[in-house]
Amino acid sequence: MSAPTLQEFQQLVSELLLRHRSLLDVVTKFSQTGASVNRAVAKSVTECGCIELRAHQQGFSEDLPFDQALRLSKSHMHGELCENCRDTIRTEMGKNLFYLAAMCNLLDIRLEEVVAKEAEKCSTLGLFNLT
């Protein structure tokens, strides 16, 4: 079975969403599930220890060429997610995506269109998209 398209996923969410039909409910659930993603990532560091963070100032300035700045930038993450943490984070991300799709449904916005416009913006603006 192939992965559903964003449109198919959004339609499925529309069919499944029973308890949280209120926009306020969906917005707060979206926020709550985003916090759960962050918490799951933090637990990968603090409880499991499969990844660790070694944060420090990035070693580049604005006058460096983009390719050189990209080579110098670091994620501060060391190690790899274990399978348990990866599954937990993936699950939390899925819940967050569910409520994003639900919010799109309630606001009559196509998730596929959101992704396409953001990809176009990233492609057009490149590095300037991040400032």
Image (cartoon, helix red, strand yellow):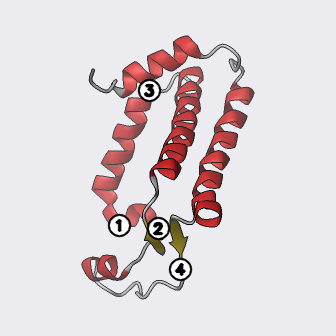
Q: Pick whichever of labels 3 and 2 is earlier in the sequence.
A: 3
C-alpha separation, residue under disc 2 versus residue under disc 1: 8 Å
C-alpha separation, residue under disc 1 versus residue under disc 4: 25 Å
Q: Is residue 62 left or right of residue 66?
A: right
Q: Pick whichever of labels 4 and 2 is earlier in the sequence.
A: 4
Q: Which residue is mark 4?
A: 54
- Amino acid identity at mark 1: Leu
C-alpha separation, residue under disc 3 versus residue under disc 1: 26 Å
Q: Which residue is mark 1?
A: 127
C-alpha separation, residue under disc 4 versus residue under disc 3: 39 Å
Q: Pick whichever of labels 4 and 3 is earlier in the sequence.
A: 4
Q: Secondary structure at mark 4?
A: loop
- Amino acid identity at mark 2: Thr
Against 62, residue 10 (above or below) is above
Q: Is residue 129 left or right of residue 47?
A: left
| Residue 60 spot, x, y in % from top left | 40, 87
